[in-house]
Image (cartoon, rainbow, N blue to C red):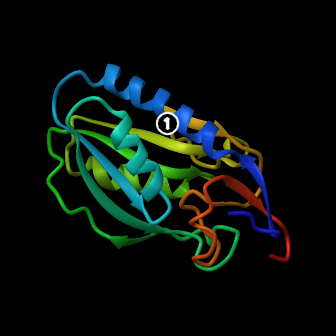
Amino acid sequence: MKNPQTSVLISEARIQVRIRELGAAITRDYPDGELILLGILKGSFLFLADLVRAIDRPVKIDFMGMASYGSGTVSSGEVAVTKKLGMNITGAHLLIVEDIVDTGRTLNALVHLLQHEKPQSVQIAALLDKEERREFAVPVAYRGFPIPDAFVVGYGLDFNEDYRGLKDICILREGA
């Protein structure tokens, strides 16, 4: 699906190749024990679905909602839980699956929150990483792609709930 307000940054084909690589690494790194993939709604849902199929071992899935953008293109600086954890993670390996890491504020808050539930380990898998914008140190164990400081949409990422269905990851042009 083409859109005149966007330009392709990462193609669907490149995304799928990288997800298979990430799935193989996760399979290798977690040979046993309970592994829970925690998708952060709404943006991670496509990445999570493809990642689960690329991991060659049993996993459990849960979702949480975290918000820091509201309806703008810049983080508000406030992090809110919009959907709570739905399962017990005590003693499990927890892999947080995020669409994009920007300042790190949301993931920093989330990791601290989840550590109170006493998982065996907590790691982060992020499809996109805007490392140059990082304000909080969050270690991304499984990183899909480093990206420049641009507002991106597609493959689950949105602007005001639009553009999620784009198959590629695209830069949203100003004034879109």
Instruction: Judge whether 81 appears above or below 34 on screen.
Output: below
Which amino acid type is shown beneath numbered disc 1?
A: Ile
Q: Which residue appears farthest toward the front when viewing the image?
A: 1
Does residue 103 appear to the left or right of 81 in the view shown? right
Residue 33 visible in rendering:
yes
Q: For the N terminus, which image quadrant?
A: bottom right
* Number of numbered discs: 1
Residue at (50%, 58%) from the top-left corner?
Answer: 106
Residue 155 spot, x, y in % from top left? 57, 56
Q: Quadrant of residue 143?
A: top right
Residue at (38%, 50%) from the top-left corner?
Answer: 49
Residue 79 spot, x, y in % from top left? 49, 68
Q: For the C terminus, which image quadrant?
A: bottom right
Residue closest to the eye, 112 or 54: 54
Residue 141 visible in rendering:
no
Residue closest to the eye, 53 or 159: 53
Q: Which residue appears farthest toward the right when viewing the image?
A: 174
Q: Quadrant of residue 69?
A: bottom right
Residue topped by disc 1 = 19
Residue at (31%, 60%) from the top-left corner?
Answer: 63
Secondary structure category for the residue under label 1? helix
Residue 81 spot, x, y in % from top left? 38, 70
Residue 43 spot, x, y in % from top left? 50, 61
10 Å neighbourhood of mark 1: few (<14), some, or many (≥20)? many
Does residue 84 appear to the left or right of 18 in the view shown? left
Does residue 38 appear to the left or right of 12 in the view shown? left
Does residue 121 appear to the left or right of 21 in the view shown? left
Residue at (20%, 63%) from the top-left corner?
Answer: 86
